[in-house]
Amino acid sequence: MGKDEKNEERTSLLETIDDLIYHMNDARLTFIIMSISSFIIAPIAIIVALVFIFHPALIRLMLIREPVFGIIFTIYIIFTVIASLIWLYVGLREYRFLSKWNERFKKYTSLKERIDRELQKE
């Protein structure tokens, strides 16, 4: 590999990373909305599921009258609680990451502009 090919490959890689970072900045609002929705919808789903699980007469009635439906319903409720907990965890992690994103993006753009100015001087 010649020197020109390495420079072209490095430039291509840097341009790809730049495009990815700018795309993340554009998609940031969508990720924030998804994170906030996980803070609202997941707890509601967990609360409703727990009300169904801990309501003894409801579960007992379903298991006695319709055992197959009762078992399927119980599995569905357990799956809902697990999925909601995962969604809540992921939403919390993404929100923590995105809350620092503006600061990181401003730092990145200022460093990129400074490097570009220095390269143009040479």
Image: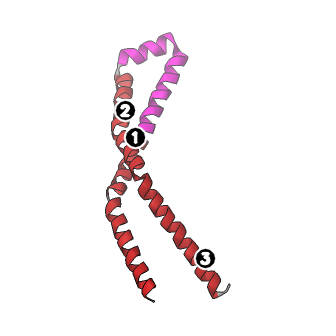
When the figure is inspected, residue 11 is found, relative to residue 73, above or below; the finding is: below
Residue 86, magenta (yes or no): no
Local crowd at mark 1 within 10 Å, few (<14), some, or many (≥20)? Answer: some
Residue marked by disc 2: 46
Residue marked by disc 3: 9
Q: Is residue 41 visible?
A: yes
Q: Which amino acid type is shown beneath numbered disc 1?
A: Leu
Residue 58, magenta (yes or no): yes
Q: Which amino acid type is shown beneath numbered disc 2?
A: Ile
Could you tell me which secondary element the residue under label 2 belongs to?
Answer: helix
Determine whether label 3 and label 1 are within 8 Å by CB: no
Q: Which residue lies most toward the top here?
A: 65
Q: How far apart are marks 3 and 1 (CA)?
A: 43 Å
Q: Distance between the residues labelled 3 and 2?
A: 50 Å
Q: In which quarter of the image is the N terminus?
A: bottom right
Q: Is residue 89 visible?
A: no
Determine whether label 1 and label 2 are within 8 Å by CB: yes
Magenta range:
56-84
Residue at 41% over, 49% down: 31
Q: Position of residue 100 (x, y in %)?
A: 32, 60
Task: Say which of 7 and 79 sits in front.
Answer: 7
Residue at 42% over, 87% down: 121
Residue marked by disc 1: 85
Q: Nearer the viewer, mark 3 or mark 2?
A: 3
Could you tell me which secondary element the residue under label 1 belongs to?
Answer: helix
Colouring used for the render: secondary structure
